[in-house]
Image (cartoon, rainbow, N blue to C red):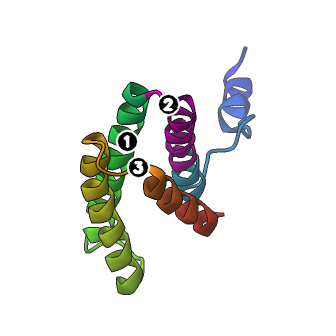
Amino acid sequence: MNASTLAQRGYAPTAAPLKSARKAEYDVIARITSRMTAAMKAKDFKKLIEAMHENRTLWRKLAIDVASPENLLPDDLRARLIYLAEFTDHHTRKAIRREVTAVPLVEVNTAILRGLK
């Protein structure tokens, strides 16, 4: 194989295009939401706790991202997303103590998924 062939392969289009940031966010939120929903339907509290923990971690990361001065989202949207992250953290703590259900967490994620789509 010569250098020209190697260069052509190196710069050839890839078989699978890279995901956009929006698509990657959608996929992560959808996967976590699906895990929470499945755990609730199966009444598997251990799996629900694991999924809620993953969801809370995701929302914390999103809050850090939108709080950054470099974030280009409008200020109003950034504030609402930070509020949702705080809500998710608070509600998750209550759901782990079995004081409330995880349904509102799924509803918030579902609304975000609609917005991303």
Q: Amino acid at mark 3?
A: Thr
Q: Which quarter of the rendering shows the N terminus?
A: top right
In the image, what residue occupies the spot 35% across and 72% down? 71
Disc 1 to disc 2, how far (Cα)?
14 Å
Helix, strand or loop at mark 2: loop
Residue 42 colored in magenta in the image = yes
Q: Amino acid at mark 2?
A: Lys
Q: Farthest front residue?
A: 99
The residue tagged 3 is 101
In the image, what residue occupies the spot 31% across and 64% down? 87
Task: Please report contact status of discs 1 and 2: CB closer than 8 Å, yes or no.
Answer: no
Assess disc 2: are there few (<14), some (14-19) or many (≥20) residues with their C-alpha within 10 Å of its C-alpha: few
In the image, what residue occupies the spot 46% across and 27% down? 44
Task: Please report contact status of discs 1 and 3: CB closer than 8 Å, yes or no.
Answer: no
Q: Horizontal placement of 86 versus 25: left or right?
A: left
Q: Which quarter of the rendering shows the C terminus?
A: bottom right
Secondary structure, magenta segment, majority class:
helix
Task: Indicate which disc, 1 or 3, sits on the residue closer to the N terminus.
Answer: 1
Q: How many marks?
A: 3
In the image, what residue occupies the spot 35% across and 55% down? 59
Q: In x, y percent, where is residue 110?
A: 57, 58
Question: Closer to the camera, 114 or 42?
Answer: 42
Disc 1 to disc 3, how far (Cα)?
11 Å
Assess disc 1: are there few (<14), some (14-19) or many (≥20) residues with their C-alpha within 10 Å of its C-alpha: many
The residue tagged 2 is 43
The residue tagged 1 is 52
Question: Closer to the camera, 20 or 11?
Answer: 20
1 or 2: mark nearer the eye:
2
Please provide the residue range marked out in magenta: 28-44
